[in-house]
Image: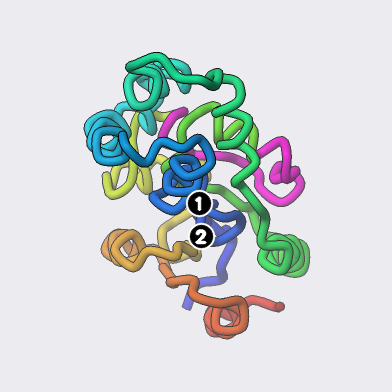
Amino acid sequence: MKKIKALFTDIGGVILTNGWDHICREKAIVKFKLEPDKEEINERHHLTYDTFELGKIDLTTYLKRTVFYQKRNFTQKEFKDFMFLLSTPFPDMINLIREVKSKNNLRTLVISNESKELNNYRIKKFRLKEIIDGFISSSYVNMRKPDEGIFRMALDISQYEPDEVVYMDDRMMFVEIANSLGINGIQHTDIESTKQKLQSFGLKI
């Protein structure tokens, strides 16, 4: 086994809660009393979200298409502020990445599907630059998982061989894609099993 030199990781579901998933949307629908329009909002979301995550439209445009396609009794700012507040950290995982990075002298990169405004907010709010060296985010690079290209881009930018990298993601399909490229992919389900998996690659915890 080659020495591991880099740790790649997702953000949502690993370091932080997801930025704007179905649970977040449901909370927003309840908060802003949008239940009568729920089906229409979710349909519009599914038709628009790929474009949003790829950075081809901004948050204002996304909300115009999905929520503010008709007059509302609340503002876009109120809705955006609520979206941002839904993000919370997993402090134990943030500390784990910090420790593994330091003890093993690793470079760290994020590979994530995130819209630009939410991604920027989350990076700044939770000080992710303290533990992450670079962000290969879908809205920055106009590619999104499951496109193999976003993994290949991370390898090219980092200049590590696939077998010198461990990639963490909570979604098994993305782990499988990483594995298919020769990257050591592990599915994150809980911190203790993730520690064991990292140790299996010779990393100090």
C-beta proximity under 8 Å, tags 2 and 1:
yes
On residue 41, which mark appears?
none
Depicted 36 relative to depicted 185: above or below: above
Is 191 placed above or below 95 here? below
- Taking the magenta stretch, the answer to whether it contains residue 124 is yes
**Residue at 49% of width from left, 71% of height from top?**
188
Q: Give coordinates of residue 78: x percent, y percent.
A: 60, 25
Q: Which residue is mark 1?
A: 18
Query: In what element is the residue under mark 2?
Result: loop
| Local secondary structure at mark 1 | loop
Provide the residue designation for mark 2: 13
Circle 1 crowding by C-alpha within 10 Å: few under 14, some 14–19, many from 20: some
Corner quadrant of residue 82:
top right
Q: Position of residue 3 (x, y in %)?
A: 56, 71
Residue 115 in the image, given as x and y percentages of width and height = 46, 32
What's the amino acid at mark 1?
Asn
The magenta segment is 123-140
Q: Residue at x 38, y 33 (%)?
A: 53
Position of 127 with respect to 62 (left or right) is right
